[in-house]
């Protein structure tokens, strides 16, 4: 495809066009593709003149950037060649794709962090519940032992055994303390259970447990 520069005279243009086997590429301006547009109306007129003189179809390129530019040239030329403007569109689309990929990667990282935090929260809640259950079981055993000790002390006191009322009072205080400890352990179990439900995403159930 021979090219005819915008500075070529009609004689030179005809000679170049004579070598064409298809169409002639008419350059609309001096400079490189992507530069500021020249006079596209004038370029279209030259293309029409060259097509009439050479008998070859003429396409105009260089400086055609917008649909309006293409329409202005196409009104007189046989074809319009769009190069740099198309490349810029592709590059802009590529930048959009890169930005979308970056956003997707950031979203994946946020999701991973959320999953990691959720797993850690769940493991912590399970460990807290297990510890609270163990503490409650131990406190229940202490209450049972102190209760039996108090019963035995009272029987010995009534039977006139080797025990005083003060000893019985000590046993009562020890049982009270054990029951207080057990109540605290059961409270810890309830709180750990609420935390576990929350870690599982069952916030509604957690609220019900707190109310009860």
Image (cartoon, helix red, strand yellow):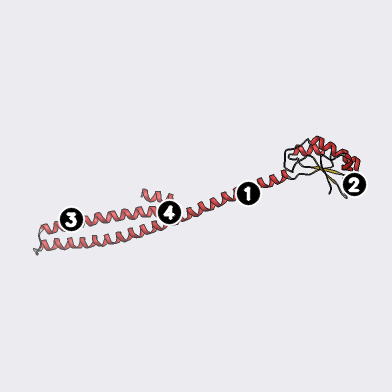
Cα–Cα gap, marks 3 and 1: 74 Å
Q: Secondary structure at mark 4?
A: helix
User: Residue at label 2?
Assistant: 18
In which quadrant of the rendered view does residue 149 lie?
A: bottom left
Q: Nearer the viewer, mark 2 or mark 1?
A: 2
Q: Nearer the viewer, residue 190 or 11?
A: 11
User: Residue at label 3?
Assistant: 173
Q: Secondary structure at mark 2?
A: helix
Cα–Cα gap, marks 1 and 4: 37 Å
Q: Nearer the viewer, residue 175 or 84?
A: 84
Residue 30, x across and y down, in percent: 77, 40
The numbered mark, 4 or 2, whose residue comes first in the sequence reads 2
Q: Nearer the viewer, mark 3 or mark 2?
A: 2
Above or below for 84 versus 199: above
Disc number for residue 97: 1
Q: Nearer the viewer, mark 4 or mark 3?
A: 4
The numbered mark, 3 or 2, whose residue comes first in the sequence reads 2
Cα–Cα gap, marks 4 and 2: 82 Å
Residue 157, x across and y down, in percent: 11, 61
Q: Nearer the viewer, mark 1 or mark 4?
A: 1
Cα–Cα gap, marks 2 and 1: 45 Å
């Amino acid at each position: 495809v021979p090219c005819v520069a915008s500075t070529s005279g009609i004689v030179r243009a005809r000679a170049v066009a004579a070598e064409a086997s298809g169409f002639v590429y008419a350059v609309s301006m001096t400079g490189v593709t992507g530069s500021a547009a020249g006079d596209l109306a004038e370029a279209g007129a030259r293309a029409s003149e060259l097509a009439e003189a050479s008998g070859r179809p003429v396409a105009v390129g260089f400086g055609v950037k917008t649909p309006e530019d293409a329409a202005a040239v196409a009104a007189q030329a046989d074809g319009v060649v769009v190069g740099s403007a198309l490349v810029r569109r592709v590059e802009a689309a590529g930048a959009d794709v890169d930005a979308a990929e970056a956003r997707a990667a950031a979203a994946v990282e946020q999701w991973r962090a959320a999953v990691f935090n959720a797993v850690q929260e769940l493991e912590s809640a399970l460990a807290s519940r297990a510890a609270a259950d163990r503490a409650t079981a131990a406190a229940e055993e202490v209450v049972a032992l102190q209760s039996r000790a108090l019963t035995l002390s009272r029987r010995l006191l009534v039977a006139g055994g080797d025990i005083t009322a003060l000893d019985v009072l000590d046993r009562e205080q020890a049982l009270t303390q054990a029951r207080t400890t057990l109540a605290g352990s059961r409270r810890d179990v309830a709180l750990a259970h609420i935390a576990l439900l929350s870690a599982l995403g069952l916030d509604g159930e957690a609220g019900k447990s707190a109310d009860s």
